Amino acid sequence: MLVFERPSETAVASAVDALRKDFGERAVTSHSVREHHSHGEGMRDAGLPDVVVFPETNEEVASIVKLCNQARIPVIAFGTGTSLEGHLKALYGGVCIDLSRMNNILQVNAEDLDCRVQAGVTREQLNAEIRSTGLFFPIDPGANASLGGMSATRASGTNAVRYGTMKENILGLTVVTPDGRIIKTGTRARKSSAGYDLTRLYVGSEGTLGIITEIQLKLYGVPERISAAVCQFDELSNAVNVVITAMQLGIPMARIELLDEVQMDACIKYSKLEGFAAKPTLFMEFHGTDAYVAEQIEQMKSITADYGGSDYRFADKPEDRTKLWKARHDAYWAGMSYKPGNQAFATDSCVPISRLADCIAAAKAEIAKTSLTCMIVGHVGDGNFHVQISFNPDNAQEREQAETAAAQIARIAIGMGGTCTGEHGIGIHKLDALKEEHGEAVDVMRTIKKALDPNNIMNPGKTIPMN
Amino acid sequence: MIETWQQQIKAAAAKGEKLAIKGSGSKSFLAPVRVGLTLDTRSHAGIVEYDPKELVIVVKCGTRVADVEKAMADAGQMLAFEPPHFGDDSTIGGTVAAGISGPRRAYAGAVRDFVLGAKVIDGKGDHLSFGGKVMKNVAGFDVSRLLVGSFGSLGVITEVAFKCLPLPKAQATRVFEMDAATAIEAMNRWYAEADPITATTWVDGKLHVRFAGAEPAVNTAVQKRGGEALVNDVDWWRDWREQRHAFFASAKELHRVSCKSTAPATDDMRTAIEWGGALRWVHADEASAAKIRYQASRAGGYASVWRGGASTHASAAQSLSDPLKDIHAKIKASFDPYNVFPSLSSSAGEGARQGG
């Protein structure tokens, strides 16, 4: 059954005409621009929108959505195009709203530790512009994503253990609803809002309930001391046990990231890291006062010694730290280029931390059944890890093997009391896994979707299985 | 128990009757007006799953908060949002449904930040599971957090999985004599300077700051900031959290103001300040109520009557804009199409609908 009926060519043509009239050169129909907006960074099964519009204000976004709602044409919001689960594929054509021109930082309230940004501001842009205030925004998915996109996908990154994910760091939103109204959720008050917590509903709704146009975000003081360290292990399970022990003791790690031997090999080659072996590795970062950081490091050293970890290699200078974390953030691209001509895609399981070693082993066993190569990188402090499966895109059999293995890995995680997606979201690729994970609860999600977007124009075919 | 409740809800839905979900009643003064048969959550109690190593605890709705905290403390852990009990038998279900957090809220997070997943029986009698028991989950809409602060208007929360945090190794509270304006500035600046603060309260001309965490961090902060040591600080903070401090007892009408943390102090009304400045408690009367609301909205927040107020004040839900009201009604109908449960806006206590 079709989730959505593609609008008629005449309906699309007249909407495009209307948008051209209102937006002039900011309504684009060239193939290259539509192609650029047809996919994220995941599997490139492009689905082209009919037109890409570049609004500059909330009101302009509202006017586009209103038009689309009247004409029953799909609306897909686009930030920087870095999502991984097919969120941007225009399954039924329609209007892509590119928010990159809404890139103003509207307020920085240094004393209140918050700011308000337009959806098109990227995380790196925000951090560059607030540097002089001594504050920073910690959420860092691999890509330099837009904050609107990060909100819409409930993104997280390497800092989640200490600073949380997007959902803990958003105070409020401006959202354009499917009928083209502009609403505000939350207030400047950090703590609470009247009525249901709509902010949390829109965060992570992947553009299916409305378009996030402004975000009020928490900021944090840059710590007095930041110290990064790397420790290597002979056995992956030892590295995992170090993480479990550290979490148990409440050591406030800012970052603790695991790379297995294959991923480490890929990163050494891709990012030209020197002096490391292709072994299971923990990348760590400590934040705090001088004394506090020193104590955290001593505690961690004693834990890693118990599990046969190597000596620490420190990166205290900002440029060294940047190089180290750039290598970690580029793990996806390192995986992509590990085998010439191959592509890779990443699973996103999150399991109870005690099952992490088991789940990783089971995932590896799943890949071992195939002829494919995989590598593992994980935000292990949260129990979240990615298996990057490398395959030849021109080989249908390899691709099928990769997809089957990924689905099976999601199933294994769900069976261990975990989730199929800790941070990438559902998009189009995990609709079946969502049903498996949430069962009848999906019915309520669908009811909410139908109630708030009765014409199903907001990113149709994504996030919530409609049948 | 679950099946009995499911039957009860289905029967009520079929007959067009109402059900009132209730735990110990400790937060009834905040809840919407409830009519119909009472569904008492206390008959569904107990810890379902708790392995401290996982940093997750799964608890049935009727479990006493005190029992959960005891089990966690024995394992060196805590519910980091420091829930106010407002009664010895206060339940976990009520805590989540009321969505109220204690002094640590501004520093560790709110109830919703620690809810990893929840089970709920909706108004059709279906028992559903949202979220899970892992630290991160972005599968579908974040419904479990929608339940936090829903005051039984969406369904019966039957089970909740919480994220646990280790108890701090060291704790010390220091007291500083200062006026409200100085206290607001200090609370904000010290926190921005990354002091290990876990609670702040300014009341009666004194700022109380609780430092907690690793011992060296606490010692450093205490030395740096000075002040006087507060003996029995554990008791003091518990009394403050439970609103047993004299400041609360002496209020005829108490307003709760949620605002940006640097909002200026109002010196013409008796006020206490916590959460680093983001939460203000104000002694009010009929004459000052409007002024409090005005000042709160100028400070980027809002005010509501917590205790003792006349029910004529515009409730928070009633003050929502039309599109927001519309969205609220649609969410309510998605869970409870036959209106078995009370609506969020049919409120007696004005403190209701104050998640956080």
Image: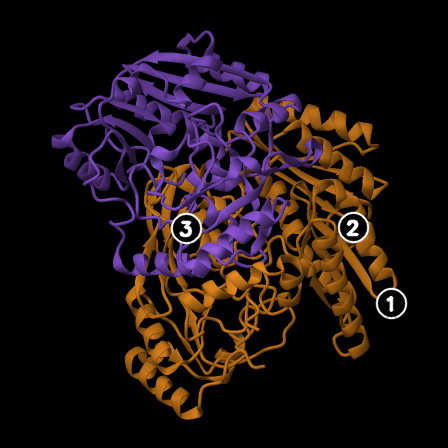
Chain colours: A orange, B purple
Kindly identify the residue that appears in the image at 28 percent across and 45 percent down: B316
Tell whether label 3 touches label 1 (CB within 8 Å).
Answer: no
Given this view, does label 2 or label 3 mark the residue nearer the observer? 3
Determine which residue is flagged by label 2: A360
**Residue toward you, B98 or B33:** B33
- Residue that mark 3 sits on: B341
Residue plotted at (25% across, 38% down) = B299
Label 1 sits on a secondary structure element that is loop
Report the residue at 44% width, 64% height from top: A209
Image quadrant for the C terminus of chain B? top left
Task: Give the label on residue A222, or none.
Answer: none
Place of residue B240 in the rendered image (x, y in percent of width and height, measured from the top left) = 39, 20
Dot 2 or dot 1: first in sequence order is 2
Query: Callout 2: residue from which chain?
Result: A
Rounded to the nearest angstrom, the CA distance separating label 2 from label 1 is 18 Å
Amino acid identity at mark 2: Ile
- Mark 3 residue type: Phe
Image point (52%, 54%), residue name: A154
Q: Secondary structure at mark 2?
A: helix
Percent x, y of residue A62: 32, 69
Look at the numbered disc 3 and give the secondary structure of its residue: loop
Quick check: A216 left or right of A50?
A: left
Foreground residue among A183 and A264: A183
Residue to which mark 1 is pinned: A371
Instruction: Indicate whether B115 appears above or below B288.
Output: below
